[in-house]
Amino acid sequence: MSEQGREELELHPLERRVLSLIISEGPLGFDEVAAKLAVNVGAVAKAAEWLASKGLAESSKASVTHVMTLGEEGLVYVEKGLPERRLVETLKSMGGEATLGQIESTGILGKDELNIGIIWAKRNGWITVSKSDGEVRLRIERYPDSKTDDELVLEILKRGAARLEDMGPLQPACERLSRRPKVLRISEVSRYVLTPTKKALSLPPEALVEREEITQLTPELLISGAWREKRFRRYDIYAPVKPVQGPRQHPLTHLIQLIKSIFVELGFEEIQGPLVELAFWNFDALFQPQDHPAREMHDTFYLSNPATGEPPNELSARVGRVHRDGGGTGSRGWGYEWSVEEASRLVLRTHTTATTIRHLAQSPKRPLKVFTVDRVFRNEKVDWRRLAEFHQVEGILVDRNANLRQLMGLIKEFYSRMGLKKVRFRPSYFPYTEPSAEVDVYVEGKGSWVELGGMGIFRPEVTLPLGVKEPVLAWGLGLERLAILLLDVNDVRALYQNDLRWLLSFNPLKLERARVSG
Amino acid sequence: MPAITLKVDRVSRFVGAQLSPNQIADLAAALGMSVEEVGEAEVKVEYNPNRPDFGSQVSVARAFKGLLEIELGARRYSARPSSVVVEVERSVESVRPYIACALVRSLILGEEDIADLIALQEDLHWILGRDRRKIAIGLHDYAKVRPPFTYRAVGLSEIRFIPLGYYQEMTPQQILAEHPTGRKYAWILQGKDLAPIILDSRGNVLSFPPIINSSLTELRPETRELFIDVTGTDEKTVNQALNILVTTLIDLGGVAYKTLIRYKGKRRQIYTPNLSTTKWLLDPSLASSLIGLELSTRDIVKALRRMRLDAKASRGGVIVSVPPYRVDILHPVDLVEEVAIGIGYENLEPVLPETAGIGALLPASKILDVLRRFMLGMGFTEVVNTTLSNTERDFNWMLINREPGVKILNPVSIMYDCLRELLLPGILSNLAANSKNPYPQRLFELGDVIVRNDTLPERAGRETHLAFVICHSTASFSELKAVLEEVLRLFELENNLTAKDYPFFIPGRGAAVVREGVEVGFIGEIHPSVLENFGLYMPVVGCELNLSLLSVT
């Protein structure tokens, strides 16, 4: 159905009145319409514009007229008479002839007026000017008995502005006067005429009938049904409105929910572990030797109070043996004297692997598929790239036939469901996995690969002391790095600054669509 | 991670084939290095600390040659006998008990070679030496000294020599106090009143490990014979470091000679370096099953030889010989990774695991999602703050007069010295940071706080809290109480407010939320002193609930 076909004629009351007038009286100038409707010409022009946009009226420049008004000098002349008239009157009273000096001495004409008067009186043939004995003498040649055309024009204009076109035979006088400085001004005025179009003329008469318009629909109008008899006033839908913002979910928790839902879809159970953690679970159980650089003070937050906790007895002994000489795992071990005191120290966990290893130590379930998305800590100076507290996406899969290619497949599937379809794997190193790998994702917008996380198969030195015989696929992926890519953030600190302008600009739909379309 | 710059021309020369910068980057990545920058003349990479042998360009080239199949299998390294003896006196036992030495002759070292050696030495100091504590290396011009050598510990003022970088003799005591290098590493000898010293037969000092060498033996471009000492607290690591250095020098054209290390009074003497390979037996089915590929013995042998390991098939599996510079092979699984890298990770096609599982969120996660949606529905915007916090903000500014339950020992930044026990301080700082943004502001946070709990092995546990605030020029207690009541209805906990004063609320405008006699939260109008502390000049009403006490999480 075309827009035209179902268009309902909606006219503003003024439009309706203007249109009715020009339909009944024929084309009219804006000024005439304004006069007849007792509104100002500006309002008529506005209505004419609206009507034109609806194809109901056309305004055209019908004519150009010239309006005359008196200038500064003209206003003086109207009162006192033209300088040439006053000159001949003065001469007449002096006997028809006088010297310039004599006329000046009367004070009837100022010096400038006298000059102008002489020029025009001479040009009109009213006087002659002669010089003798160094004196300028003026004499009446022909005294003008009746009013000149110029004087008639001034008299007409004394009553108000007039149009040049209405002046008939006086037109040359008007033009003459307009050439005299500041006497008479002629300005051009265009005149517009509003003409109804064919469409307007074929309108049914009821379209132009005035009806009451509803601004606000009220319960009363609904109950009484009175709205049926009325029209709804059209609104200016372009008018600005007061903005409404929020509330918004924080982008990070939104992303975390998304990630959790993906792992649930992939058949993983969520787990959670302590943030304050024993060095034992954070490091020792993961075969990280006690002098490993990652355990240094400048990488790990240690606690001063409480400073130590209680690692599990029996397991500690087994883990200690593995560190020392392999403890029957087929490994050579690190070859040093392991200290349970060092393992008792409390740290803020540096990775969520502390939680998966705890779970692995407790859960006899096979196969086992668990994940966690949670906070970890690094004792680092915070800058635009680094935070001291951030999130990891961690998980393990324990199964008899689990292998490296499956681990790659799983991580690839995860990123693909996040909308990052292109991934690659590189060898890497973690003390607790072997083989190990690093995953990079390709970011179309940046045109480059971005490193997002590590993974591997837990070493026998890690799993055997826990009594786990099956291969354990493990991964720990960065959440904030992913967030930066997906949320288009430049400074990682922004994720925790909670600037309302940023929070309220978050577009969860855009994120979801990017994820789905990849 | 340690870094190394691979010069395109130099590496190409070592490899024996002209490589492009991109080829070098790809090879480095295939070996597990992380490529940082690819330039026209050089490629900057970082390598993993399990491979300290990647600390020199010539040894990286050695690995490249394997992947390029220019040279396969392990290169044979050996050291010839020599008459050089190092006597180890018992005095070093309590300070720095182990030493391993080697002599390398026939060297022609260019400036680049020396720069490489020094860079390798520094990386080894860090990776294997834990900043020289565990091992420290001395490289000496052998022409300046005469064996036999003695390794002994002397009193800190007992001996004088000119240390590197100085022109006058100093005692170890003076070096530790005045020499920049001495001051930097003095901590390693903290609490010891002895200085380990290596002397030659004429009584000249070679080195004061792990601090500094004597200027006498400084390397020069004309140095043709190099004497290496590695001292330390762990004998295995001392030998590993020596082996990496010596194999690198052999790759640079040197000829290595053994030295006899004689531990006096212990009847113990050993020759170093020991450049023999280590034998491992790899079960092919372990490689196949961990990698997830059906690999024949031949495939495995081929992949390992590409990784510069010697491998041959035998009845019991694949016999692998690991060269002396590889310090990262602890278990057969390490060889499995070598196989995987030898095949190339890019050749391992990812497959989805077949392992079935039933996915589930933690019940707490589901409940928190419900609460989050509810708070959003109530018109509150979510904020997320860190658990790391500081006493000033969380306690002093809040007028809470007690110590935090958990304190951090060693924060790098003073921003963090404790962990949050309430969410409210974080949200108040969010409001302060948003004072230029339009009001009203309605914020909430769902997050964990940390509480001391000595019944737990880790002495501190997590509790989940919900906090919400309203901030605008006419924010009032009743406005927030209406929201709280709606929240409490969710928990079927209506009418559980008890008037109570809190240091951070205006007296008479605070209340506890109590369930069965236990305080599970509070609500109130923030005290102007607290607002001032936060730099906030707009009224705030706030509420915080401990969801763990409500048996929600």
Image (tube, coloured by chain):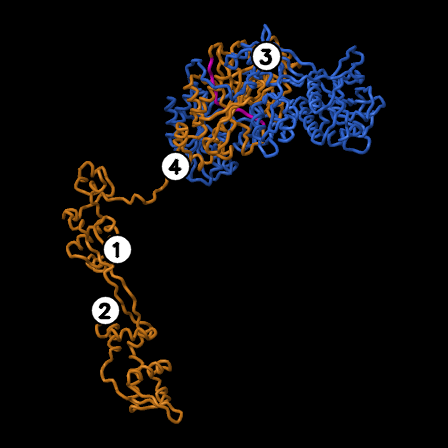
Chain colours: A orange, B blue
Chain letter behind tag 4: A
Q: Chain of mark 2?
A: A
Q: Is label 4 or label 3 in front?
A: 3
Q: Is residue A518 visible?
A: yes
Q: Does the magenta run of residues contain A372?
A: yes
Q: Select label 4 or label 1 by which is in front.
A: 1
Question: The C terminus of chain B lies in which quarter of the figure?
Answer: top left
Please identify the residue farthest to the right as the structure is shown.
B202
Q: Which image quarter: residue B2?
A: top right
- The prevailing secondary structure element of the residues shown in magenta is strand
Question: Disc 4 vs disc 2: which is toward the camera?
Answer: 2
CB under 8 Å between discs 2 and 1: no
Residue sitting nearer the eye, B37 or A228: B37
Of the image marks 2 and 1, the number of the one nearer the N terminus: 1
The residue that disc 2 covers is A165
Q: CA distance from mark 4 to mark 2?
A: 63 Å
In this picture, residue A4 sits left or right of residue B240: left
Residue A437 part of the magenta segment: no
| Magenta-colored span | A368-379
Chain to which mark 3 belongs = B
Within-10-Å neighbours for mark 3: few <14, some 14–19, many 20+: many
Residue B388 at x, y = what percent?
54, 28
Q: Label 4: how many residues lie within 10 Å, few (<14), some (14-19) or many (20+)?
A: few
Task: Indicate which label's residue lies in the foreground, 1 or 3.
Answer: 3
